[in-house]
Image (cartoon, rainbow, N blue to C red):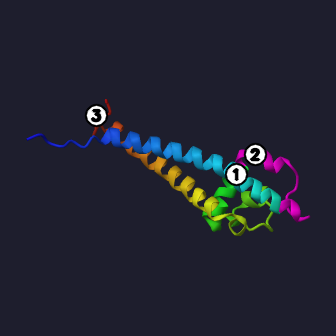
Amino acid sequence: MPQAVFNIPFFVAMVFTVATFTMFLSFLVLRFTLTRNIKKTATADPDGWFDDDHYLGIMNTAFLMWACAAPAVKTWKNYDRNMPTNIDVRANAKPLEIVFSYMLAFSVGTLVICAIIYYLTDFFGWIDWEF
């Protein structure tokens, strides 16, 4: 009777690939939706967005994503330096943008966990990573 073999390296590689694809897809969606939405909200307020330089950066999208997924981000010093403090990102985000923010946060966490599993098992030689 053949035994079912669970191929751990292949599973980790597939999880890593799916997490990477999800991360890029979520980032692109948030770049084109959430950043534009917040820009429109901020420019309507005279004390909102400072200038167009803040809109152009990729770090801006990352700050907006973390502010949407984790409201505690607003207490960070770097957030206050880069973002106008009078804009509530989560209140101005659409439900789909909130979902994509969580998808991006979880995919980054999954990539970190997969990398830790790979390097620990490769370093200690617990699993043969040859496919």
The residue depicted at 25 percent of the width and 43 percent of the height is 6
- According to the picture, the residue beneath numbered tag 2 turns out to be 57
Measured as percent of width and height from the top left, residue 30 is found at: 66, 52
Which residue extends farthest top? Answer: 130
For the residue pair 3 and 80, the one nearer the viewer reads as 3
How many discs appear?
3
SS for dot 2? loop
Residue that lies at the very extreme toward the left in this rendered image: 1
Amino acid on which disc 1 is placed: Thr
Query: Nearer the N terminus, badge 3 or badge 2?
Result: 2
Q: Is residue 131 above or below residue 2?
A: above
Rendering coords of residue 1 (x, y %): 8, 41
Q: CA distance from mark 1 to mark 3?
A: 39 Å
Q: Amino acid at mark 2?
A: Gly
Distance between mark 1 and mark 2 Cα atoms: 7 Å
Let me know if residue 45 is in the magenta part: yes
Q: Quadrant of the C terminus?
A: top left
Please indicate, yes or no, whether residue 70 appears anywhere in the rendered image.
yes
Pick whichever, 77 or 5, lies toward us.
5
- Residue 112 as seen in the image, left or right of residue 55: left
Q: Is residue 94 left or right of residue 81?
A: left
The earlier-in-sequence mark between 1 and 3 is: 1
Residue ID at (87%, 59%): 43
Residue, disc 3: 128
Q: Which region shows up in magenta?
A: 42-59
Rendered view: 121 above or below 91: above
Image-based side of 27 in relation to 124, left or right: right
**Label 1 crowd bin: few (<14), some (14–19), many (20+), radius 10 Å:** many
- On residue 61, the disc is 1
Circle 2 residues within 10 Å: few <14, some 14–19, many ≥20? few
Do the residues under discs 1 and 2 have CB atoms within 8 angstroms?
Answer: yes
